[in-house]
Amino acid sequence: MTVINLGVPSLGPADPAPADGPLIDTFGRIATDLRVSLTDRCNLRCTYCMPAEGLDWLPGDDLLRPDELARLLRIGVTKLGITSVRFTGGEPLVAKHLEDVVALTASLAPRPEITLTTNGIGLARRAAKLKRAGLDRINVSLDTVDAARFARITRRDRLADVLAGLEGAKAAGLDPVKVNAVLDPTTGLDDAVGLLRFCLDHGYQLRIIEQMPLDASHQWQRGRALGADDVLATLQRHFDLEPDPAPRGSAPAQLWQVDGGRGTVGIIASVSKAFCAACDRTRLTADGQIRNCLFARQETDLRRLMRTGADDDAIEAAWRAAMWAKAAGHGINDPGFVQPDRPMSAIGG
Ligand code: SAM
Ligand code: SF4
């Protein structure tokens, strides 16, 4: 394949995906960051993600077996140029084999960076084991430090477990420990201030993420979720914020230095200021589907390919074709936007 200026490929959507080189799409974006969902199950019921009664979990036979996941990780890293792997879910700590999967990923060459997004429940007793297995960094989701609000948002009274998980991650030497927050539309601005104080006091890095239309109940409403500008204005009333001078690259968070360098806060404006043009992600669901975007309406079934005897070259080609077809953007703000059928918990955020 010929690549011209700015990395934009000279091939178009009507051409087949390139058979080698990096995992590229027709807009010239290269995917190097693989998000792997290990399960769609979870022990919380965050209102913006899952209904109170949970969901119809994926049938056990549909889930990738450990050998199948190992094979796809190897193909991703050794043939497709994946340099970073993030395990997520559902709740990845619900997956008993998480430490084994981390260790296996760490044994690949070239070794990718290995990270985890978790709600932190049960992390206190597993953080050291995960670090020893090869985990490099961690993001713990926490939307408020107020116990009553936490119980209302997650429908479980587990704030203490999450705080213990954060402590465990720090004690295990996972550095930096990042805290991901999706703010509640009613209490979120107040929660943001409390979270930033808490994170500054404990040495955690706060990342606030705009709520997206990925909830299983399809309750998300345009204009109801808090926007990045409102969050920033509120934080600026309580803290001294200066733009972080470091180049942002493909990182989704706009970073701010807080109170003369006491810490940083990141604001991820996924809806109001989409960063799709810099996206470097490819996603693998727990049932072996490749998604080229959180909001994709089509998936590529690598599990079926593996189970019908496809060789590594065929799997590699299918993965390349899936990414080649990636849309320019998520389209949330387009008039004809349609929310994907799979909720966030079954995709892997
Ligand atoms: N259970 C783990 C956790 O909560 O960190 C991992 C999976 S969860 C789907 C990954 C991330 O997606 C979390 O930080 C969560 O807050 C975020 N998330 C879930 N639903 C979301 C939504 N509708 N909009 C934006 N972020 C969402
Ligand atoms: Fe579970 Fe994470 Fe969804 Fe909350 S956001 S319900 S912790 S998967």
Image (cartoon, helix red, strand yellow):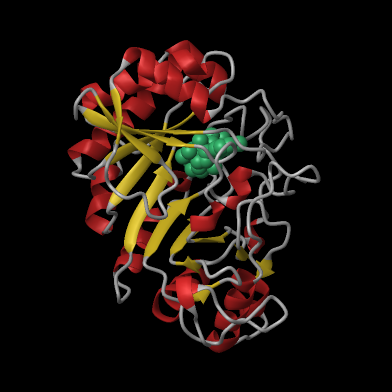
327 to the left or right of 92: right
Q: Position of residue 308 (x, y in %)?
A: 68, 82
Residue drawn at x 58%, y 36% is 272
For this rendering, which residue is in front, 2 or 266? Answer: 2
Front one among 316 and 337: 337
Residue 89: x %, y % from top left:
52, 48
Q: Quick check: can you spot residue 349?
A: yes
The residue at the point 68 percent across, 43 percent down is: 332
* Identity of the residue drawn at 57% across and 24% down: 226
Identify which residue is drawn at 38% across, 54% down. 249
**Residue 191 occupies which quadrant of the picture?**
top left
Compared with 328, 26 (above or below) is below
Indicate the position of residue 317 as horizontal and vertical percent values. Answer: 59, 83
Q: Is residue 224 left or right of residue 250?
A: right
- In the shown orientation, is residue 61 left or right of residue 36? right
Any part of residue 121 in sight: no
Outermost front residue: 5
Residue 70 higher or lower than 40, as above or below: below
Query: Disc count in the image?
Result: 0
Q: Position of residue 312 (x, y in %)?
A: 53, 85
- 292 lies left or right of 103: right
